[in-house]
Image (cartoon, grey):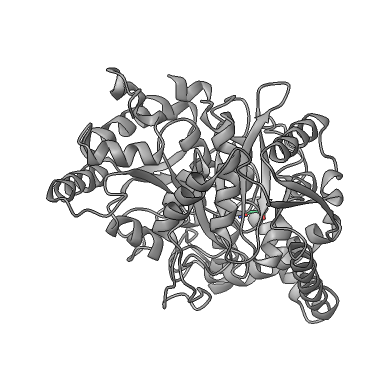
Amino acid sequence: MSDLSSDLPAQLHTLSVSELVQGLQNKQFSAAELTEHFLQRIEQQDSAVNSFITVTPEMARAQAKAADTRLAAGDAPLLTGVPLAHKDIFCTQGVATTCGSKMLKNFVAPYDATIVAQCREQGLVMLGKTSMDEFAMGSDNESSYFGAVHNPWDTARVPGGSSGGSAAAVAAGFAPIATGSDTGGSIRQPASFCGLTGLKPTYGRVSRYGMVAYASSFDQAGSFGKSAQDCAYLLQALAGFDSKDSTSVQVAVPDYIAELQAARQSAGDKPLAGVKIGVPSSYFTNGLSADVEQVIRAALKQYEDLGATLVDIHLTDTDITLATYYLLASAEASSNLSRYDGVRYGYRCDNPANLQDLYTRSRSEGFGNEVQRRILMGTYALSAGYFDAYYVKAQKVRRLVRDDFLRALSQCDVIATPTTPTTAYRIGEALSPEQIYVGDVYTIGVNLAGLPALSLPVGFDGQGLPVGLQLIGAHWQESQLLQIADGFQQATDFHRQLSPLAKN
Ligand code: GLN
C-alpha cells in the first residue's frame, strides 16, 4: 500500500483484493468511492467490450452505502465493500438473469442463487451481471444473444467463454473480481485468453443452487481475479455446503487466505521445494501452437527454478475425453433445457396455433443454433435405440478418465498443462463447431473427474496475447493449488500486466 500515490483514485481498479481490503479498512477510500470508480469505468468504456448484460448502479450504490456503515461499525466481514460482477447464469432476485439467451431475456428470478446471497451477506457489492455464451455452451462468447464480447487485450478478439463477460470485465478493470461457472473449461479458458487467474473448484465445493443448469454433473461455480490470492478471497466467500443443493458436499472449508499467507511466510529461497508437478505428454499435442508451447515450457522451467520437481505422467488421450464430455454434457443439457417450453416461464412465441406449435416455435425462436444443436445431439444419445451405445458407454469412459487422473495424482501433487491450444482468436474468425470444441481439449478432462483446477497467466505469445498454464489438483485441494500458483506469482509479474483497456 505504501506506493499508493496521490493519484490513487485513478488506480483503484489496478489494486489486488488484499489492497482493496486494506484500503477500505484503513479508510483510504470508502466502498462508495470504490463502487463509483468501477461504475464510471463501466459506463465510459464497456461499449468497447460489451462485458455486461445488466449493470445495477442503484443496487450497487445502496450496497456500498450499507458496506460503509458496516465498516464504520468495525465488525464487518473481510470482503465488505469490495465490488464484484456475477456471471448472468446466477439468479438474482429482482434483477434479470438471462443466461445469455433470448429464451430468458425477460426472466427475473424470485430468489438469489446461494452464492449471490453469500456474497451479499459478506458485504460484497454487486456491480451487475456479465455476458456469456448462451446457456454456457461455447468457448468464445460469440453465442451470447446480447452480442459478442471483446477481449480487452485486443478488442478484435474473443475473450473466451462461456464466462467471457466476467473475464473481460476483470481484464478491462470494470470489476476487481467476478464469478463464473465451469462445466468444461468456462472459467479457465477465458482466464487464459484474458490474462487472468481463474479457479474451478472441486465439484461439490460451491453450491449450484440458483445457477441455471447446463450439464448438472459437471457445472461448478468459481472465481476470476488478477491473481491466485484474489481467487482465494472470492473462493472463501463462495465455498461451503448448501442443503439446497444435493450435490454440494459437507467437507470443511479451509481458511484459504490464511493458508496462502502461511505458505508465503514459510517460503525459503526455493519456495516450492518438494512440490511434484506432473506433466502429461498427451497434453502437449492436439494442435498445441508453437507459441503457447514455448511459453508453457518456460513456465515449467521457472517452476523448477522455484524448487519444484517435474515428473512425466500418463493421462488418457485427450480425444477420448473430448468425445466423452460432448456426449454427456449434451445429454444432460437436452434434459435440463426441456423445462423451457414456452409455458411456465421464458420466451413464448406469438399466436401459437396449438400446443405443439407453442412448444416448437417457442423453442426454435427462443434458443440459438448452438443450444439447439446440443439439445438434438443429447436427445439422440439418450434415445431408446442409442442409449446403451452412447450414453452408457460414455458414462463408463468417464469413470475410467476419473480413475486415470487419480492414479496420476498419486504420483504428483498437481498436474500442469497448457490451458488452451491457442491464444485468443479473432471475433468472427470461427471456426466450425467441431473446431471450437477442440479448443476445450485440455480443460474438459478435469470436469469429467470433478477435480479442482486453475489457469494462471504465465506469459505472452508473439502478438502480445496472454497464455495460461493450467494446474490440476486432487479433490478438495484448492488451497494447495492456489499456493502453487501463488508461489509462481510471487516470483513473476505476468499477473500484474494490465490490458490496454485497463491502463486507461
Ligand atoms: N466450451 C465448453 C462447452 O461449450 C465448456 C463450457 C462451460 O464450461 N460452460 O461445453
Who's the residue at 72% across and 68% down the image?
A: 328
Q: Is residue 185 left or right of residue 501?
A: right
Who's the residue at 50% across and 59% down the image?
A: 349
| Residue 43 position within the rendered picture, expressed as x and y whole percent measured from the top left | 35, 29
Tell which of 475 and 402 is nearer to you: 475
Q: Does residue 141 show up? A: no
Tell which of 317 and 131 is nearer to you: 317
Q: Quadrant of the N terminus?
A: top left
Q: Is residue 214 left or right of residue 126?
A: right
Tell which of 152 and 388 is nearer to you: 152
Quick check: 95 above or below 155?
below
| Residue 257 position within the rendered picture, expressed as x and y whole percent measured from the top left | 43, 52
Q: Quadrant of the C terminus?
A: top left
| Residue 455 position within the rendered picture, expressed as x and y whole percent measured from the top left | 62, 45
| Residue 391 position within the rendered picture, expressed as x and y whole percent measured from the top left | 78, 74
Q: Quadrant of ligand 1?
A: bottom right
Who's the residue at 65% across and 27% down the image?
A: 465
Q: Is residue 116 left or right of residue 375?
A: left
